[in-house]
Image (cartoon, rainbow, N blue to C red):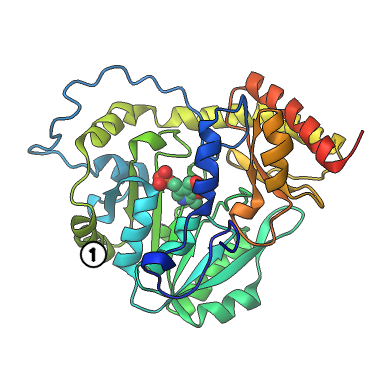
């Protein structure tokens, strides 16, 4: 294996299918249940769902429409919504429903499935990168314009994993315009964007734009695998055909659980605000103490910073493990991020404060500061 980061290239099948190396690395470490866990990219929300009667029974019946909850969340017609099992499944269904067979531009750094799935579906991908500045990560317009002229589809994750920064307003406007000019469709993975109360889903930018999301990150319900696609009626009709072929039907327990919590969807967003207020200042002052400059992204529950000169994968697998600490190395998301570390603050303030103390010890050892 070349490294842990996602890869781009031609169509891939059988042994050419790229691994999601991040998950191969992460899942065994998550199972260790290290006591200080700063690895979460989603909110850890203490849902109490009680008992749901006949949860396994078919939820369908006259007058019901599975898509109503999401159509109301977005203020769109049910014909503009397709449900999927998580955003990860929405990625493949949306590509199949949206592609016109050309090359696909994929944004990095990225969550592997977002940049790699097009290859499994027989398409060639080309990388475009967002680059760090002292605050937001920005588009290199010259590089992106050149790639957009070669593709007919673009995959993006506005609230970038692992750094949590969204597009600047001017980059977003530029991107929408450039994609219209080059007749490029956009699939926007917005699983983190619900933490921004003023977020405008890409779907509303035009018929060439598709938004996908799920209840996994902002609502802390990844276990139930509830995701969706928002797109034009034509693209949604294609998505329905693909979904029927690849997945069949939605699982009734998933729909019933989502129904149970539909009036509480704002509560996790409030908790994210609370965790930001309580936890972020602790992280920022600890980083200052060890000489790391960092500006947190304005929304969400994770961010990433450089630990200059330190291989963070090695750091987490050695010193981190010794101290019972888990956080995610930047190398999982792109080449060139070997000395970046992603840290999440979606846990209760007491556990977070303890974990930040431990992270300080680990960083001091790695940076050799006494
Ligand atoms: C950008 C992005 N999209 C999607 C997912 C997964 O979402 P889901 O659990 O809904 O499949 C992740 C998980 O890390 C992610 O980072």
Residue 52 in the image: above or below residue 228 = above
Residue 142 in the image: above or below residue 348 = below
Q: Residue at left 33%, top 28%?
A: 261
> In screen coordinates, is 287 left or right of 183?
right
Kind of element beneath mark 1: helix
Q: Position of residue 194 (x, y in %)?
A: 48, 43
Quadrant (top left, top right, bottom left, bottom right) of the N terminus:
bottom right
Q: Residue at left 52%, top 77%?
A: 148
Q: Is residue 99 visible from the viewing direction of this image?
A: yes
Q: Position of residue 252 (x, y in %)?
A: 20, 36
Q: How many numbered marks does the figure carry? A: 1
Q: Which of the 4 image quadrants contains residue 186?
A: bottom left
Q: Residue at left 65%, top 19%?
A: 350
Residue 14 in the image: above or below residue 281 = below
Work out whether residue 14 or residue 269 is closer to the camera in this orientation and state it.
Answer: 14
In the picture of the structure, the residue carrying the numbered disc 1 is 238
> In screen coordinates, is 225 left or right of 164?
left
List the single residue furthest toward the left.
Answer: 62
Q: Position of residue 212 (x, y in %)?
A: 39, 53
């Amino acid at each position: 294996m070349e490294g842990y980061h996602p890869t781009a290239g031609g169509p891939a099948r059988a042994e050419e299918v790229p691994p999601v190396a991040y998950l191969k690395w992460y899942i065994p470490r998550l199972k260790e249940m290290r006591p200080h866990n700063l690895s979460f990219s989603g909110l850890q929300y203490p849902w109490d769902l009680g008992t749901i009667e006949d949860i396994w029974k078919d939820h369908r019946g006259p007058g019901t429409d599975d898509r109503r909850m999401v159509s109301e969340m977005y203020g769109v017609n049910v014909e503009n919504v397709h449900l999927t099992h998580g955003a990860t499944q929405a990625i493949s269904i949306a590509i199949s429903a949206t592609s016109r067979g050309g090359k696909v531009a994929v944004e990095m750094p990225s969550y592997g499935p977002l940049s790699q799935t097009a290859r499994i579906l027989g398409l060639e991908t080309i990388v475009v990168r967002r680059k760090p500045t002292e605050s937001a990560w920005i588009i290199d317009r010259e590089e992106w314009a050149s790639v957009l002229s070669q593709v007919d589809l673009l995959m993006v994750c506005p609230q970038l994993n692992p750094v949590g920064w969204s597009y600047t307003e001017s980059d977003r406007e530029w991107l929408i315009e450039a994609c219209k000019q080059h007749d490029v469709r956009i699939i926007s993975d917005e699983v983190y964007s619900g933490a921004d109360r003023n977020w405008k889903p890409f779907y509303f930018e035009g018929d060439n734009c598709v938004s996908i999301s799920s209840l996994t990150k902002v609502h802390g319900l990844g276990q139930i695998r509830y995701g969706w696609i928002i797109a034009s009626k034509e693209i949604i009709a294609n998505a329905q055909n693909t979904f029927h072929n690849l997945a069949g039907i939605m699982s009734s327990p998933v729909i019933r659980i989502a129904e149970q919590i539909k009036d509480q969807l704002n509560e996790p967003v409030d908790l994210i605000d609370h965790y930001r207020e309580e936890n972020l200042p602790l992280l920022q002052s600890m980083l200052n103490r060890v000489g790391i400059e960092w500006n947190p992204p304005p929304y969400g529950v994770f961010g990433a910073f450089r630990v200059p000169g330190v291989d963070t994968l090695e750091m987490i697998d050695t010193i981190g493990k010794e101290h019972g600490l888990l956080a995610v190395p930047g190398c999982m998301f792109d080449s060139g991020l070997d000395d970046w570390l992603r840290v999440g603050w979606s846990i209760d303030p007491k556990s977070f404060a303890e974990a930040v103390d431990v992270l300080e010890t680990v960083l001091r050892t790695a940076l050799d500061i006494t």
